[in-house]
Amino acid sequence: MVIIIQDGASEETIQNIIGKVTELGFAPHPLYGVEKTVVAVIGDKTQEQIDSLQAMPGVERIVPILRPFKLAARTVQPEGTQVDLGGGVVVGGRQVVMMAGPCAIESAEQYLSIGRFVRAAGASVLRGGIFKPRTSPHDFQGLREEGIPILRQVREELGMLLISEVLDPRGVELMHDVVDIFQIGTRNMQNFSLLTECGKSGKPVVIKRGMCATLEDLLKAAEYVLVEGNNRVILCERGIRTFEDQYRSTLDISAVPALKSMSHLPVIVDPSHAAGRTDLVPALCKAAIAAGADGLLVETHCNPLKALVDGSQALDAEQFHTLMDALRPFAHAAGREL
Ligand code: PEP
Ligand code: MN
């Protein structure tokens, strides 16, 4: 159930309610929203327990959560959650947040040059992996630990927020101080110990939908992060496996409005891994914005033909600039900024 706190209730009043929940033997999950503060309480309660909470000062009303995912359910935060990434960048607000950069970081020079052009074109977040989840162990696995000083250097030099994939729980500690957002990849969506560790880190987490996962599976994965008290969770649709083989995956555009009606969490779209082809990326970005996406995650490279990973779907500097210019009117038409 969710305890909706009255507008203007003092912190002391909220703490009293949280204390009462704990006293009754439940774990309280407070969520401080832009408009409403709520306390989610998981577990079976007796009518007597519910009545005792309902009677407390500061309680506006109590609503049950009927979904199998609890903390991620829309009921918990009907106006939608805004995830503050720091540096004035908020996902889930008016801005469509552009996250762009290479699939894999190859060197400091490569990462800096890509970072400079995506920043100049208006991206707010720079992506780039140092641990790459490759289907074959014989393919380039990323710079791994050697990439840490590059992340640190580029983050300082460009002053951009960085998002990078964390492959296993050990990486959470290793990357904690050099990235701003953890990315959990499609292959790791149900790596529960990794989700828990990211939850404990308190950092914003982008969870990519497993390529064969349902929306309910994705929301239950998000639940592992939320239950640790980390509410900065962003969902990412990146394409699912279907019989169609003209592109790498099939972008499930319906997932955007469907997830938004099921959950209060912001939703972003990765058109690059869905398409696997540079030429399709602009159209998929436009479709994502039209469907209500709160952000985009796009792969770019200074020289796609020479990219060590995913060059076939990367946009070069000129293509990325052109894309940003083309997307702005779409964002405005959708009542958003880019
Ligand atoms: C990536 O973002 O480079 C990546 C590997 O994505 P996904 O997990 O969606 O395949
Ligand atoms: Mn990639």
Image: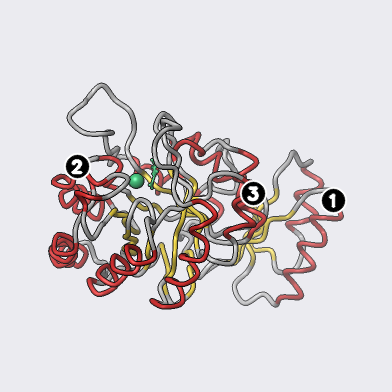
Q: Secondary structure at mark 1?
A: loop
Of residues 291 and 243, the one drawn nearer to the viewer in this rendering = 243
Which residue is label 1 attached to?
Answer: 24
Decide if residue 150 is in sight here.
Answer: yes
Question: Who's the residue at 34% across and 33% down the image?
Answer: 240
Question: Who's the residue at 84% across and 48% down the image?
Answer: 25
Which residue is label 3 attached to?
Answer: 170
Q: Position of residue 229 (x, y in %)?
A: 66, 57
Which dot, 2 or 1, sits closer to the camera?
2
Q: Position of residue 300 (x, y in %)?
A: 26, 56
Q: Position of residue 310 (x, y in %)?
A: 29, 44
Q: Secondary structure at mark 2?
A: loop
Does the residue at mark 2 contact the one at mark 3 (Cβ under 8 Å)? no
Mark 3 and mark 1 lie on one chain; the one further toward the N terminus is 1
Which residue is label 2 attached to?
Answer: 277
Q: CA distance from mark 2 to mark 3?
A: 33 Å
Question: Who's the residue at 14% across and 67% down the image?
Answer: 325
Does the residue at mark 3 contact the one at mark 1 (Cβ under 8 Å)? no
Of residues 333 and 203, the one drawn nearer to the viewer in this rendering = 203
Mark 2 and mark 1 lie on one chain; the one further toward the N terminus is 1
Amino acid type for the residue under numbered disc 3:
Arg
Q: Residues within 10 Å of mark 2 (few under 14, many from 20)?
A: some
Which dot, 2 or 3, sits closer to the camera?
3
> Relative to residue 163, is residue 196 depicted above or below?
above
Q: Quadrant of ligand 1?
A: top left
Question: Who's the residue at 43% across and 55% down the image?
Answer: 266
256 relative to 5 in the view: left or right = left
